[in-house]
Image (cartoon, grey):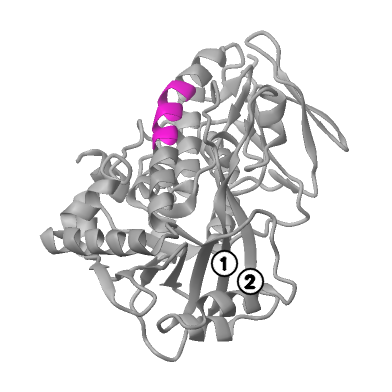
Amino acid sequence: MDHPRAQRAVVIGGGIGGLTAAVALHRRGWEVTVLERAAALTPVGAGIGLAPNSQRALDTIGLGDRVRSLAAWQGDGGLRTPGGRWLSRTDSAATAERFGGPLVLLHRAALVELLTSVLPDGAVRTGATATLADAGDDHRRAVVSTASGDLEADLVVAADGINSAVRRTLFPDHPGPQYSGYTTWRVVVPAPDRPFAPHETWGRGSLWGTQPLKDGRTYAYAAAVTPAGGHAPDGERAELLRRFGDWHQPVPDIIAAAEPGGVLRHDVHHMAEPLPAYHRGRVALVGDAAHAMQPTLGQGGNQAIEDAVVLAHHAGGGTDPAAGIGQGLAAYTRERLPRTMAIVRQATRTGRLAMVTNSPAVAARNTLIAALTRLGPGLLLRGFDGIADWQPPRPTYAAGTAPSRAGTRGRQR
């Protein structure tokens, strides 16, 4: 008796969203191929904060507990002024109680390594430039062109980032992401000699964050209002020193410890105008390709992980080639587009608040944050209601495999 062939999914892009989608689809019985144009899976960026919502998503593919074991659990910290005054203090226990778990931080490279480790040998192809040649439909498979030939696919997952070529092919009239008005810097350095509490510091048109990693290093990020496309002629570490060198410790120590060429700089863009859909034909967009957002809520990577497991859920099991994919992808769009665009808009509002440049407005902002903190930490945490408490639709596992205990607890809340 002939057995039905496994359906094939081609994932364009080997970032966190693409790799999570590959794992989730593989768990459901799909044959997966990941095409990454870079020569190696070297993540752009340094640290990633995983909120309880993305941890629950990872629970559904059996990786939640393993991710938590790699993570630097963040203790109490808060929001400061450049002079060092605390505007608000965060209570990690209260956060965990409200949302079913704390925020955890790990290096992006560790998460990428974990995701690739559970994919079949040969599933990830690096140095593979891919172009969508045909989006397909319910009666015709999609086609992805590569230098080594065309690949037919029952499903194409476009995880090719903020400048997604697949998005432009599917929706050529959409304006794409727009510049958010500020740029960011990121760096990983050895832990400073002096202990510090995790913090984010808001200044006038600028901010800085410092967070510990489990391996003993420190991840720091900064942002400042500046014209798009700028680069410091004497290096980005020198630029950080000019902008943040007189801020409270450990900021000067972090800058001093940075390698001259080790500071990443990227302009921030976001999807101000929503796409008409997150799919077309047999192609689904995930992560920044669909809904690029400002980093002010720390949800960009988290939402890409959510996308991946929801997409795998609606795509169904991968062993029925006769199953139509159109209804599943339409359900994916219905579920993901309203949620992610609401978070895009909330991140934009937070970005405006963090990046105010008028001194009286900065003073008013700081006074308001301090007053809300005195009234109770729960008031500030409300901003993450509906985000961090998200639940995945159901386990993405293939039949017969149980989710982790942490994931089960989350769904029973």
Cβ atoms at labels 1 and 2 below 8 Å apart: yes
| Residue 284 percent across, percent down from the top left | 59, 27
Q: Residue at x 62, y 32 (%)?
A: 157
| Above or below, comparing residue 294 to residue 4 in the picture | below
Answer left or right for 391 relative to 341. Answer: left
Q: Residue at x 42, y 65 (%)?
A: 71
| Residue 206 percent across, percent down from the top left | 47, 65
The residue closer to the viewer here, 129 or 7, is 129
Kindly state the secondary structure of the residue where label 2 is placed.
loop
Q: Main secondary structure of the magenta part?
A: helix
| Residue 380 percent across, percent down from the top left | 23, 54
Quadrant, the N terminus: top right
Mark 1 vs mark 2, CA separation in Å: 6 Å
Residue 263 tag number: 2
Asked whether the viewer can see residue 119, the reply is: yes
Answer left or right for 366 relative to 107. Answer: left
Q: Residue at x 40, y 82 (%)?
A: 248
Question: Is residue 334 shown in magenta?
Answer: yes
Q: Residues within 10 Å of mark 1 (few under 14, many from 20)?
A: many
Question: Is residue 29 shown in magenta?
Answer: no
Number of labelled discs? 2
Q: Which residues are magenta?
A: 333-342
Q: Residues within 10 Å of mark 2 (few under 14, many from 20)?
A: many
The picture quadrant where one finds residue 102 is: bottom left
In the image, what residue type sits under mark 2? Val
| Residue 338 percent across, percent down from the top left | 41, 28
Quadrant, the C terminus: top left
Q: Which residue is mark 1?
A: 186
In the image, what residue type sits under mark 1? Arg
